[in-house]
């Protein structure tokens, strides 16, 4: 979905008392760069979730959230931005992979705290 359509969809949803959660990717270069820069020197995650070692892997998801860009970003109805990190260790091979996903949501920290936000869908391809 092109950024302009996402902006229209965001306004449409919020105008109907709904919320949006969008993954931010390379087709939204400025938005992606601003969010990535915010989380570049991040502290401890706001939430960490260790999945049971099922399916031959150990998976840890970490999430960082921030409202620091709300008044800066050129995107409608921003409640917060987030970074989700997925750290997977294959139990058999020992190989480790780390993927990151940047995102934006209309929900405020009170509406979607990091504990709740861990359920956001993670993309199949790494972001950076």
Image: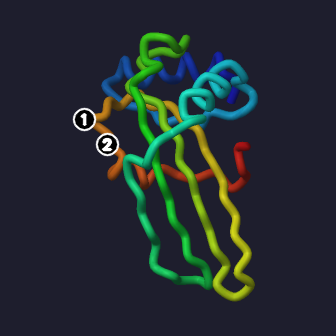
- SS under mark 1: loop
According to the image, label 2 marks what residue?
Answer: 113
Query: Which residue is at a point 31% across and 34% down the rendered structure image?
Result: 109
Query: Which residue is at a point 59% across and 83% down the rendered structure image?
Result: 55
Query: Which residue is at a point 43% across and 18% down the rendered structure image?
Result: 70
Q: 112 left or right of 40?
A: left
Q: How is the image coloured?
A: rainbow
According to the image, label 1 marks what residue?
Answer: 110
- Position of residue 72 relative to residue 97, above or below, is above
Where, quadrant-wise, is the C terminus in this rendering?
top right
Which residue is more in the foreground, 8 or 27? 27
Query: Which residue is at a point 61% across and 22% down the rendered structure image?
Result: 34
- Position of residue 25 relative to residue 114, above or below, is above
Where, quadrant-wise, is the N terminus in this rendering?
top right
- Position of residue 11 relative to residue 91, above or below, is above
- Residue 62 locus on image (x, y percent): 48, 54
Numbered circle sitting on residue 31: none
- Image quadrant in which you'd find residue 30: top right
- Image quadrant in which you'd find residue 64: top left
Q: Contact, CB < 8 Å: mark 2 with mark 1?
A: yes
Which residue is more in the foreground, 74 or 90? 90
Q: 42 left or right of 106?
A: right
- SS under mark 2: loop
- Position of residue 32 relative to residue 77, above or below, is below
- Residue 23 locus on image (x, y percent): 59, 38
Which residue is more in the foreground, 35 or 17? 35
């Amino acid at each position: 979905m092109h950024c302009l359509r996402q902006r229209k969809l965001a306004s449409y949803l919020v105008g109907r008392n709904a919320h949006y959660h969008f993954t931010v990717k390379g087709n939204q270069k400025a938005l992606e760069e601003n969010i990535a820069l915010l989380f570049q020197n991040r502290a401890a995650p706001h939430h960490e979730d260790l999945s049971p070692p099922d399916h031959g892997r150990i998976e840890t998801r970490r999430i960082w959230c921030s409202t620091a860009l709300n008044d800066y970003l050129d995107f409608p109805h921003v409640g917060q931005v987030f970074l989700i990190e997925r750290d997977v260790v294959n139990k058999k091979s020992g190989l480790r992979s780390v993927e990151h996903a940047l995102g934006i949501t209309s929900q405020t920290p009170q509406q979607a705290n990091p504990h709740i936000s861990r359920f956001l869908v993670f993309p199949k391809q790494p972001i950076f």
